[in-house]
Amino acid sequence: MRAADQEYYRRRERQERETAERTRDESVRRLHLEMADRYVSLAEQASPPAIPIAARP
């Protein structure tokens, strides 16, 4: 995936956490936090794999 994808997922994570903070309904808050966690997972999948130091040119 591209860096733009990772940025999008990170932005959506922040938005979901902000929405969770503002809501008064605990069940809705949990749903937004779960969605934020899913965006974290997607952002991690979008990260380029780490290159070991020995493998670098």
Image: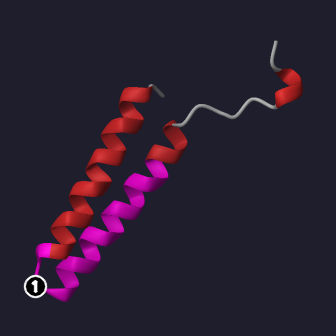
**Residue 23 place in picture, x, y as percent:** 11, 78
Nearest the camera: 52 or 45?
52
**Residue 57 place in picture, x, y as percent:** 82, 12
**Residue 54 place in picture, x, y as percent:** 89, 26
Query: In the figure, 42 relative to 19: above or below?
Result: above
Q: Type of residue at label 1?
A: Arg
Colour option used: secondary structure
Nearest the camera: 41 or 51?
51
Q: Which residue extends farthest right? A: 54
SS at circle 1: loop
Query: In the figure, 44 relative to 56: above or below?
Result: below
The residue sitting at 45% across, 47% down in the picture is 42
The residue to which callout 1 is attached is 24
- Count of labels shown? 1
Relative to 4, is 18 on the left or the right? left
The residue sitting at 28% across, 79% down in the picture is 30
Q: Residues within 10 Å of mark 1 (few under 14, many from 20)?
A: few
Q: Which residue extends farthest top? A: 57
The residue sitting at 36% across, 37% down in the picture is 7
Relative to 3, is 8 on the left or the right? left
Locate residue 29: give its quadrant: bottom left
Query: In the figure, 27 relative to 51: above or below?
Result: below
Secondary structure mostly seen in the magenta stretch? helix
Q: Assess whether residue 53 is covered by the magenta stretch.
A: no
Q: Which residues are magenta?
A: 22-42
Q: Assess whether residue 33 is covered by the magenta stretch.
A: yes
Relative to 4, is 41 on the left or the right? right
Query: In the figure, 56 relative to 24: above or below?
Result: above
Locate residue 36: give its quadrant: bottom left
**Residue 19 place in picture, x, y as percent:** 16, 66
